[in-house]
Amino acid sequence: MEKAANRHAPTAPLKIAIVGPESTGKSTMSAYLAEHYHTVWVPEFARGYCENLTEPPTWQDEINMFYGQLALEGEYLPKANKLLICDTTFITVKIWSDYTFGRSPQEVLDELPKHPYDLYLLLSIDLPWEEDPLRDFPHMRGHFMDIWYKELNALNANYVLISGIGKERYNSAVAAIDGFLMSDSSVS
């Protein structure tokens, strides 16, 4: 009798992180996947934050973006329908801080292992670069792709590389999530 009751207990939504270097279609992919799976997606906090800056981000700005991303995820989690799609994660703060300042805020390093995602979709740099005032490194996409591999491997993260253009890219992402859901017994 107890087993049957536990089987129907609500489970926390699975967290799917959409990550990768600049201009790989993370926001577009996040919106597409949220619509496909009838759920919500967490926007990238840093985008809105940086749009309001008049100078390059400071060390404190990076810390603020870290806390802002965590707060947004907390806000959207109760609204999720089995899956929470996250347009990037605060690993981005670590990557940018390491590049810009040569180190990462201790808060970020301490929290990384405490905030795992169930699946990461690492978007490839095979999309053409799109200019944007908040994008800085069209010539360093390969470098940052290597860093994403390194960071995800350091976390022992479950990730799938997503490549392709247009519908092929979206289909690859859906296939990766569907495959993960079929192998994960916690989602019904």
Image (cartoon, rainbow, N blue to C red):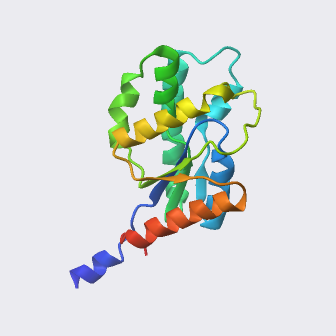
**Picture residue at 54% right of the left edge, 42% below the top:** 72
Q: Is residue 180 left or right of residue 33?
A: left
Between 155 and 146, the one lying in front of the other is 146
**Picture residue at 53% right of the left edge, 60% below the top:** 80
Q: Look at the image and tell me whether residue 151 can be seen.
A: yes
**Picture residue at 65% right of the left edge, 43% below the top:** 24
Q: Is residue 128 left or right of residue 56?
A: right
Query: Which residue extends farthest bottom?
Result: 1
Q: Which quadrant of the figure contains the N terminus? A: bottom left
Query: Which residue extends farthest left?
Result: 2
**Spot occupied by residue 163 in the image (x, y as percentages of width and height):** 60, 52
Q: Look at the image and tell me whether residue 90 can be seen.
A: no
Which quadrant would residue 19 be assigned to in this image? Answer: top right
Which quadrant would residue 153 be assigned to in this image? Answer: top left
98 is higher (above) or lower (below) than 147:
above
Between 136 and 61, the one lying in front of the other is 136
Q: Which quadrant of the figure contains the C terminus? A: bottom left
**Spot occupied by residue 172 in the image (x, y as percentages of width and height):** 59, 61
11 is higher (above) or lower (below) than 56:
below
Which quadrant would residue 130 be assigned to in this image? Answer: top right
